[in-house]
């Protein structure tokens, strides 16, 4: 027979852990992963400092779990909605647009957890850098795969360099978040990023009617 008190403790423990990770990702998007302090997270998540030690042995373990949580958020908020669009050039555009919507909705106070983490750990060897690099690699491979699908469906020209296109789409997404935050003009930055990718796809597509004109 299951001990309902034990089940209750497990549920509360899981909820506490998720609340802490949600706050960790939000704070890291502004302060960086190294800015995750025990007191700051405890206050933001509304838990005691002692509660942290039930979930994480050290700061690096917390950082790695925060990256995993952010990756799941990225899948739920950006990748899954885009994959509802039929495969081809429209799905490729939808993925970019979903990313920009994530930014414009200000889901995270710093805009983008992964861009912040990439800048912070690009030259710092160790498990955290490796996990951040893997996240970027998986994202680029996804964009490239969608581009290859569009080629196979005949919606992008056969000579399309899928890897190059993936690089360009990601670079425009990253540039948009930097310009929006540093120059303080979200609308212009995100609109330019969308139109740049749209024009690139229109130049490469075999059927421009598949894409909006603007």
Image (tube, rainbow, N blue to C red):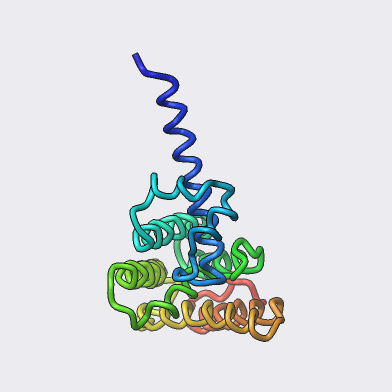
* 84 relative to 110, above or below: above
Q: Residue at x 61, y 61 (%)?
A: 107
Q: Residue at x 48, y 65 (%)?
A: 36
Q: Is residue 86 visible?
A: no
Q: Position of residue 190 (x, y in %)?
A: 64, 77
Q: Is residue 71 visible?
A: yes
Give the residue furthest to the front. Answer: 50
Q: Position of residue 166 (x, y in %)?
A: 41, 77
Give the residue furthest to the top. Answer: 1
In this rendered view, identify the residue nearer to me: 127 or 206.
Answer: 127
* 55 relative to 166, above or below: above
Q: Residue at x 57, y 51 (%)?
A: 45
In the picture, the quarter occupied by the N terminus is top left
Q: Quadrant of residue 29?
A: bottom right
153 left or right of 186 in image: left
Q: How many marks?
A: 0
Q: Position of residue 27 (x, y in %)?
A: 55, 64
In the picture, the quarter occupied by the C terminus is bottom right
Q: Residue at x 52, y 84 (%)?
A: 203
In this rendered view, identify the residue nearer to me: 32 or 196.
Answer: 32
In this rendered view, identify the residue nearer to me: 197 or 159.
Answer: 197
């Amino acid at each position: 027979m299951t001990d309902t008190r034990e089940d209750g403790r497990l549920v509360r423990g899981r909820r506490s852990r998720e609340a802490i990770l949600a706050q960790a990702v939000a704070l890291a998007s502004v302060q960086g992963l190294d800015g995750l302090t025990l007191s700051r997270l405890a206050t933001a998540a509304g838990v005691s400092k002692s509660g942290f030690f039930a979930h994480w042995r050290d700061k690096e373990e917390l950082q790695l779990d925060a990256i995993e949580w952010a990756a799941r958020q990225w899948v739920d908020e950006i990748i899954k909605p885009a994959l509802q669009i039929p495969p081809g050039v429209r799905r490729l555009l939808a993925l970019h647009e979903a990313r920009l919507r994530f930014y414009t909705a200000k889901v995270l106070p710093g805009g983008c957890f992964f861009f912040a983490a990439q800048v912070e750990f690009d030259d710092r060897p160790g498990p955290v850098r490796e996990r951040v690099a893997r996240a970027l690699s998986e994202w680029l491979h996804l964009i490239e795969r969608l581009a290859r699908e569009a080629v196979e469906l005949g919606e992008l020209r056969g000579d399309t360099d899928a890897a190059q296109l993936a690089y360009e789409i990601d670079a425009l997404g990253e540039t948009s978040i930097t310009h929006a935050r540093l120059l303080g003009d979200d609308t212009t930055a995100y609109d330019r990023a969308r139109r740049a990718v749209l024009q690139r796809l229109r130049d490469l597509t075999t059927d421009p009617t598949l894409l909006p004109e603007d």
